[in-house]
Image (cartoon, rainbow, N blue to C red):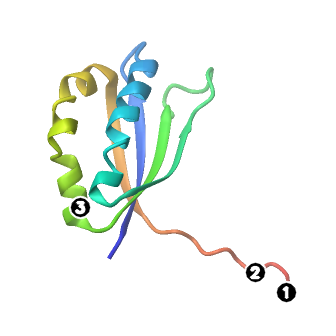
Amino acid sequence: MPITLCVLLWPTEGSADLLSRYEDDVLALVPVHGGRLLSRVRALPGQDAALPTEVQVIEMPDDDALAAYMADPARVALADVRDRAVARTDIVRVVAVPDRDTST
């Protein structure tokens, strides 16, 4: 059964661009494990720093595919970059909310 994740990311001080480059690299690995990046957005500059800088919605085929992605050697090799770039990551399992018919 597919799983959908909402990933919220906060950069370390002054590392928003490094976070973005790191995410470019690791998100390229998602399709290798059968997943899809459904959405990726960044906050506009000047907003509350307590809010995440980047939000992604990722779909993976199942928990095994997610575990394989997390353990991918190419992703693991970038751990030092991640440690420098990412201050916080929150991952929330989500489900799409169907559109409500407002015509009636």
Residue beneath disc 3: 65
Residue type, label 3: Ala
Residue type, label 2: Asp
Query: Is the C-beta separation of discs 3 and 1 under 8 Å?
Result: no
Residue beneath disc 2: 101
| Horizontal side, residue 92 vs residue 99: left or right | left
Residue type, label 1: Thr
| Horizontal side, residue 102 vs residue 16: left or right | right
Describe the element under mark 3 as helix, strand or loop.
helix
The earlier-in-sequence mark between 3 and 2 is 3
Q: Nearer the viewer, residue 56 or 51?
A: 56
Query: Is the C-beta separation of discs 1 and 2 under 8 Å?
Result: yes
Q: Nearer the viewer, residue 7 or 71?
A: 71
Measure how far apart labels 1 and 2 are at the Cα level.
Answer: 7 Å
Residue beneath disc 1: 104
Query: Residue 104 location in percent, x, y?
Result: 85, 87
